[in-house]
Amino acid sequence: MLILGVLTTLGAFALALWFIARGDTEIPEWASAGLAALFVPVLAVFFIRFQFWNTMANAVPVTAKQFPELHELYAALGAEMGFTGSKLQALPQLYVINGNGVLNASAAKCQVRKAYIQINSDLLDIAYELGDFRTVRFVLAHELGHVKLRHVSIWRLILGPVNTILTLRPSISRAQEYSADRVGCYYEPEGARGMAVLFAGKRMYQRVNLEEYYDSIRSHRVGLWLRAANYFADHALGFRRMAAIEQTASQGWNVHGKML
């Protein structure tokens, strides 16, 4: 998907130059997006600084004295994953934000060569209230996987304008999410099954019969509308995502989540 994204962007840029060379006064939107891609890195530098400060100023940094259990888990995981250097190899700062009921976490840039990770307080409830630190460890490994695989690199934003118009951007994101899930499965295989929290909620997910859930995934009909919904989603639909996690655990690493 990344190669396809690069090729479509280069193709749109080349065609935009061709239209200009011909003296055309009107350039198709998808072609002009190829020219717009040139300005994305410059704009991104300003955007990531704004987004970081907007997040950091409304969040609680995780330190050895602030949420010490979470800090210890995160630092150990980071060392295991090789985040022991500086800049891109430094362990990203972790922040806790008020999720307002949303179960989510994300990785992003705070500087050109530095990243940070934020995790919603609602996800941490399952650790501090229910004692499920394994699922939280999976989530953190997933987000650190995004950083490790350079999914948050600024240059990838260049692919955005053209591939958004061509409806390929969600597919690139979906492929990245599958990859980050595989990283999470490697470092915390037990926590991966806890991803049912995204679909059943933090109060009910531990009551989900996972075998029955996986049986329902295997038995459902794969039709046009499921494929369409999955195609336009930047994260694989729950059935597809959980199926890939289960197959990784049972069949090994030569498993790829379904894109369509």
Image (cartoon, helix red, strand yellow):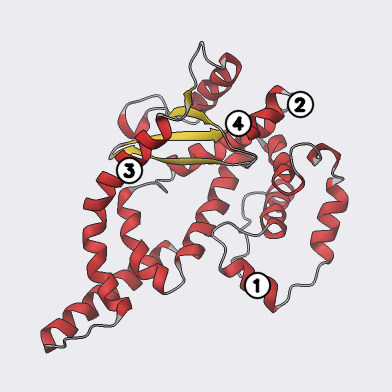
Q: Which residue does the numbered mark 2 point to in the structure image?
A: 130
Q: How far apart are the two marked residues, 4 and 2, measured between alpha carbons?
A: 13 Å
Image x and y of residue 125, in percent:
68, 29
Residue appearing at x 49%, y 34% in the figure: 118
Q: Residues within 10 Å of mark 2 (few under 14, many from 20)?
A: few
Comes first in the chain, label 4 or label 1: 4
Residue appearing at x 50%, y 63% in the figure: 170
User: Mark 3 belongs to which amino acid?
Assistant: Ile
Of the numbered discs in the image, which one, if any, rests on residue 48? 3
Q: Residues within 10 Å of mark 3 (few under 14, many from 20)?
A: some
Pointer 1 with pointer 2, Cβ within 8 A:
no
Q: Which residue does the numbered mark 1 point to in the structure image?
A: 227
Comes first in the chain, label 4 or label 2: 4
Pointer 4 with pointer 2, Cβ within 8 A:
no
Horizontally, residue 70 falls left or right of residue 196, namely left
Viewer-closest of 8 and 80: 8
Pointer 1 with pointer 3, Cβ within 8 A:
no
Determine the image quadrant of residue 134: top right
| Callout 1 secondary element | helix
Pointer 4 with pointer 1, Cβ within 8 A:
no
